[in-house]
Image: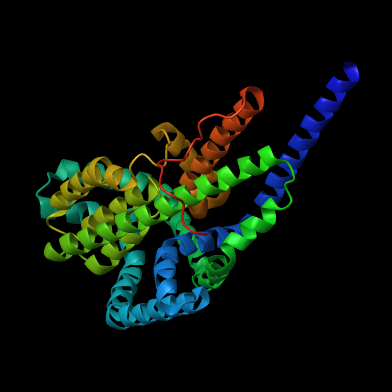
Amino acid sequence: MLAFIDSRTSRVVFTLLLFALGLGLLYVARRTLMAFLFAIFFAYLIDPLVTHLRRLVKGRGRAIAIIYVLLLALLVIGLFFVGPKITREGARLSASLPELLSRVSSGEIARQIGQERGWSAHSQEMLRSFLVNHSDEIRSLAQRVGIRIAEVAQKVWLLVLVPILAAFFLKDGRAFTGVFLTFIRSKPQREFMEGVFADMNNMLAHFIRAQIILAALSLVVYLSFLGLFRVPYALVLGTAGGVMEFIPVVGPLVAALMMVGVAVLMSYEHWLILVLFLGAWRLLQDYVIAPRVMGEKMELHPLAAIFGVLAGGEIAGVLGVYLSIPVMASLRIVWRRWQLYSEKKRFGPLNEYVFGATQLPPRF
């Protein structure tokens, strides 16, 4: 009996050590892993188009090539018509930031805003004193923001690498899964892993497409409102707001602060209307639109989502924040499948758990 216990304990300890070693390797190689994860997300995004086109051109490779050519053409057209305008606005905004930072740190901006808004001299002096007393913190915050932006800019190579990696996942994704499953000899364990892969397929496909819909909708709404009310640098701010919608929780907040900050510093008259619009749109997006688009398929409690976002930011920065929700949902899937696997071993066949819904996962 003692030998059995020792043998079982040793297997458990060995498995835990292997799991810890795997997590350590993933953390060390997290930058490379991020490129592969984004490639998988990109593959999920265009997989339905490839699947439908494959039936017409009678070949998955041909379908992938056609889709890539069309996407490249759309990108070139978009850059040709919109790119120069965004570049000009971005250059003007970047050129004006040092002067704005100097005016904020010196407190000069307080008097300008106060005079434009009709504030009393006492209120202007209070705001000026506050800005002067916290000038070091303001400069430090600006430096940290600049460093973060530079870090994101350094990852621009992902825009080239991700589509290349995604092409391999689109073409041979199911083969990769099959090769992995051949290493598992036990039938119950094989069924466990097949269930995990199927549920992750379903979850990731739904998550990526829902994020695209929400980001595109935010982009259109931001550009329309900012352009209609003639907010300074509307094209840059609206585009940035739509892109930041991809980053859960943190992205929309940063976008809103950026829009309001630029509007106030540029002496925009209707900044209060902008604040009300951003608040109303956030409520509409988070409590009406997003639940309908996402549905209940992510199966995550809000507290779990917030924890995942904060932990992801600590581990891998902006990329960690973005990947936090699907990673948390994946951990939940593994846990639910493991519970089912354990119950099957103890009591025999049970009703299958299917993540989110009964629909079939995408084909890869």
Q: Coloured how? A: rainbow
* Above or below 41: residue 72: below
Which residue in the rendered view is the most extreme toward the front?
349
**Which residue: 18% across, 42% down?**
123
Q: Position of residue 339 (x, y in %)?
A: 58, 29
Nearest the eye: 181 or 240: 181
Above or below, comparing residue 110 to residue 235 in the picture: above
Q: Residue 89: horizontal and vertical position, in percent?
A: 28, 73
Q: Quadrant of residue 102?
A: bottom left
Q: In the rendering, at what x and y percent does residue 80 appear?
A: 31, 83
Between 212 and 221, which is closer to the camera in this rendering?
212
Can residue 108 be seen at all in this image of the molecule?
Answer: no
Give the residue at x 27% y 44%. Answer: 292
Quadrant for residue 16, please give it. Answer: top right
In this orientation, does residue 332 appear? yes
Residue positioned 37% across, 51% down in the render: 251
Q: How many marks?
A: 0
Image quarter (top left, top right, bottom left or bottom right) of the N terminus: top right
In-image side of 21 versus 107 (left or right): right
Q: Nearer the viewer, residue 338 or 138?
A: 338
x, y percentage for residue 214? Answer: 30, 54
Outermost residue, top side? 1
Q: Please state if 107 lies on the left or on the right of 11 as rendered.
A: left
Q: Nearer the viewer, residue 175 or 133?
A: 175
Identify the residue at the far right of this view.
Answer: 3
